Image (tube, helix red, strand yellow):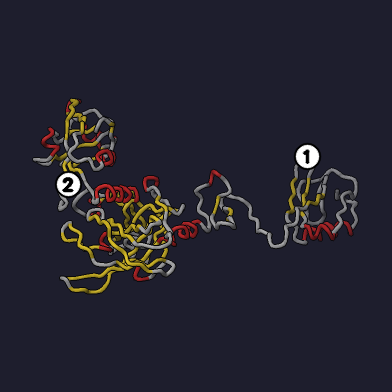
Amino acid sequence: MVSRSCGRNSLIRVVAIAAAGSGLFYGSSNPDSKTRISLSIPATLHESVLVQRQMSQSFTPHSPFISSDCWQFGNVSLVSSRVNPASSGSIKKEYPVTEEAPVKEETTGDVKDGKDSCCRCLGRDTIANAAARVCPAVVNLSAPREFLGILSGRGIGSGAIVDADGTILTCAHVVVDFHGSRALPKGKVDVTLQDGRTFEGTVLNADFHSDIAIVKINSKTPLPAAKLGTSSKLCPGDWVVAMGCPHYLQNTVTAGIVSCVDRKSSDLGLGGMRREYLQTDCAINAGNSGGPLVNIDGEIVGVNIMKVAAADGLSFAVPIDSAAKIIEQFKKNGRVVRPWLGLKMLDLNDMIIAQLKERDPSFPNVKSGILVPVVTPGSPAHLAGFLPSDVVIKFDGKPVQSITEIIEIMGDRVGEPLKVVVQRANDQLVTLTVIPEEANPDM
């Protein structure tokens, strides 16, 4: 303990120990309790310095604070402690585990958070680690470009190996030409891996409406493959990473956030079938098409497809959930089969329902559902008896609240009768039977 009567040499010895770069100098003070100062001393210093534990009798402090003119520590005890010295070659740099500073593992290079409550914290290496997990599977694609049957150069794009057997996920417009809805092969596709190896790729499948294609390469050894994630878990503001080779610049990584998780094709002025995209502010340019959009866990959550030419920070990707369903249909049917009902539909919410009730008091008393504003004449829905202003509340026996749910239920079920419950004006419930047809590919 240090007291007023402690000698000058003892005090200098204590200060010298603290100034020598000890691991921790910690002081606490409370008027109602004893005050302690803990000093953690490195092993090498501990071996050469003798700390005097008992110095003088204690006294009651005048103030709980340390004054500049005289040390008034009160009832002070000085404790030395040491940790076992690390063996040669095994010294690790230790960092405090906080929400702001996640711990980096030396063995894998992955960032792990110090607290379970902060498992989604963005650390210094989070984006770098996410890119590193996918980078080996990102490929550069080069395909011949023709105009009126004349070779006019080569187009570039990107892709990602999603299976160790050489299956590559990319954009259809990168690897095929489309005449109407028919895919015309561009010839052989050159595939370059991140490690410099080159392969000749074959286009297995391509879908015009979704702009998704599958390219296959053959290798005698297993190829690096990226893991597919789930785009349905994304929220606006989530960090994402875009990877590819814009303007022939291979191994390019850009980062940004998700701006919208369900940007509709109609919002972008795109006609044809209904489609939804992920909107991000990642830098996307020519050559990024087909490259993966990756979350901070190093999983593919989208396929980069396009940007707004006259604007910055407006890029779009096909959600990986949609791409995965297309891949399944490629394997099952060799093409994408899309059921068609002939309905225009609108998701309802409280505000829309209130507005419709204000305009027409006979509008059905529903809390949710899908409004049918238009029925195409001669369509399966028209033949089934659908009427404008119907509200779909059940589809194939399941309650539904969004168009997406109806699309998921239908899947590729063409020619199969489906029971649909609709609620009409004055709360009239009607059960209809509709038989979906395959959509015209030129629609």
Q: Residue furthest front?
A: 220
Residue 130, horizontal then vertical, whole percent: 47, 56
Give the quarter of the image for residue 146: bottom left
Tell me where residue 321 appears, x and y as whole percent.
34, 48
Depth check: 108 or 241 in front?
A: 108
Residue at 40% of width from left, 49% of height from top? 229
Give the residue number, with chain letter if any, for mark 1. Answer: 33
| Quadrant in the rendering for residue 219 | bottom left
Q: Earlier in the sequence, mark 2 or mark 1?
A: 1
**Can residue 234 be seen by looking at this rendering?**
no
- The reply, left or right, for residue 74 in relation to residue 370 is right
Q: Label 2, label 1: how many angstroms apart (C-alpha)?
A: 81 Å
Residue occupying the point 22% across, 53% down: 209
Residue that carries the numbered disc 2 in the rendered image: 439
Residue found at x 24% / y 43%: 412
User: For the residue carrying disc 2, how many other residues have a C-alpha within 10 Å: few (<14), some (14-19), or many (20+)?
Assistant: some
Give the number of callouts: 2
Location of residue 426 with respect to 413 vertically, above or below = above
In-front residue for pair 188/41: 188
- Label 2 or label 1, whichever lies nearer to me, is 2
Q: Residue furthest left?
A: 378
The vertical placement of 294 against 416, above or below, is below
Question: As drawn, is 32 to the left or to the right of 214?
Answer: right
Picture quadrant where residue 429 is located: top left
Q: Position of residue 279 (x, y in %)?
A: 33, 54
Residue type at mark 2 is Ala
Q: For the residue labelled by badge 1, is the local secondary structure a helix, a strand or a loop? A: loop
Tell me what residue is drawn at x 15 percent, y 70 percent. Answer: 148
- Type of residue at label 1? Ser
Q: Residues within 10 Å of mark 1 (few under 14, many from 20)?
A: few
Of residues 267 and 319, the one drawn nearer to the viewer in this rendering:
319
Residue 31 in view (yes/no): yes
